[in-house]
Amino acid sequence: MQLRTLLLNVRPDPAARAAREAALRRRVLAESPNLRRPDFARLTPADLTYVFQRYDAEVFGGALQTTLASPRGGPLDLRVSARMTRAGGLTRRGLRRTFGKVEQRFEISLSAPLLFGTFCDDPRPITVVGRLCNDRLDALLRIFEHELLHLCEYLVFGESNCNASRFAQLAHDLFGHTEATHRLITPRERAHLDHGIGVGDVVDFQFEGQRLRGRVNRITKRATVLVESTRGRRYSDGGCYEKYYVPLEALSRATPGS
């Protein structure tokens, strides 16, 4: 079946969808390179390749790989990103014109910081695309489904927008998604949970044997700390600051008056 036909006409009922979802999860746990337990500790592109192959076979009937290999398609790269700290996943399409011909390439990336920063010790309910996730594997599969739909839309319609009604309808009909967002724990939230540190806090840290004090300006995998200095760059508040990238565990909240 062509991918366009499948997207526009196939509507699995909720019972069939749940059965397919459970079967796919069991196969991932049994056969993937590293996802052998629900809260897996390692994730590689080989795991994403396996998950892609399972979804293509069991949801799309092989239509994804067939379309990627056709003139409408192009190479697909699957990546695990250590730099994505807000989005759980990202799908890109690149276009390149060579010898009068437009070639396209696709990339799906999943966020390691968000997946591995969640399902640790915080008891809050975690939802992804409106679905409750009980463990890290649930979250990975829901994110991957969302990104696969972006890929499908690029291949069939030439554009994709998860805020548009077409995407929302496809996401609901194929996967039971009711939202396009996640509630995974971000590095900023993790910093507050583990270290009691947030953006705007005044902190102390050691640098080359010197004790420095500054204000947290940003949190990703590390904290960006601005320290007042006449050698620094001038910021919008009129002050001059030097910028330091500091591991969160190396920071301590400044004691008032110290």
Image (cartoon, rainbow, N blue to C red):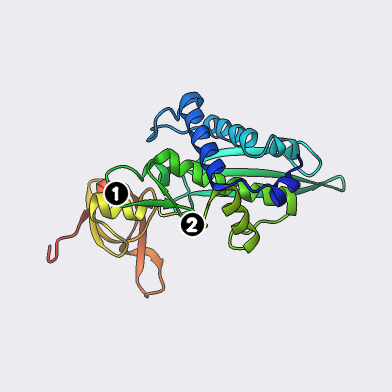
Q: Nearer the viewer, mark 2 or mark 1?
A: 2
Q: Tag 2, which secondary structure?
A: loop
Nearer to us in this view, 127 or 26: 26
Q: Earlier in the sequence, mark 2 or mark 1?
A: 2
Dot label at residue 214? none
When the figure is inspected, residue 201 is found, relative to residue 52, above or below; the finding is below
Q: Which residue is mark 1?
A: 248
Q: Are marks 2 and 1 in contact (CB under 8 Å)?
A: no
Quadrant in which the N terminus appears: top right
The answer for how far apart the CA atoms under marks 2 and 1 are is 27 Å
Front-lying residue, 152 or 208? 152
Where's residue 89, x and y in %?
A: 52, 48
The residue lying toward the viewer, choosing from 17 and 192, is 17
Please determine whether, in this image, residue 183 is positioned above or below residue 66.
Answer: below
**Residue at left offset 30%, top offset 65%:** 200
Image height of 37 relative to 84, above or below: above
Q: Is residue 223 visible?
A: no
Residue 122 drawn at (x, y percent): 28, 48
Q: Which amino acid type corresponds to the residue marked 2 in the rendered image?
A: Thr
Quarter of the figure with the C terminus: bottom left
Q: Which residue occupies 59% across, 58% down? A: 168
Residue with the mark numbered 2: 181
Say which element carries label 1: helix
Instruction: State the count of labels.
Output: 2
Q: Quadrant of residue 212?
A: bottom left
Kindly identify the amino acid type of the residue bearing the numbered disc 1. Leu
Is 149 positioned to the left or the right of 255 in the image? Answer: right
For disc 2, the neighbor class at 10 Å (few under 14, some 14 to 19, many from 20) is some
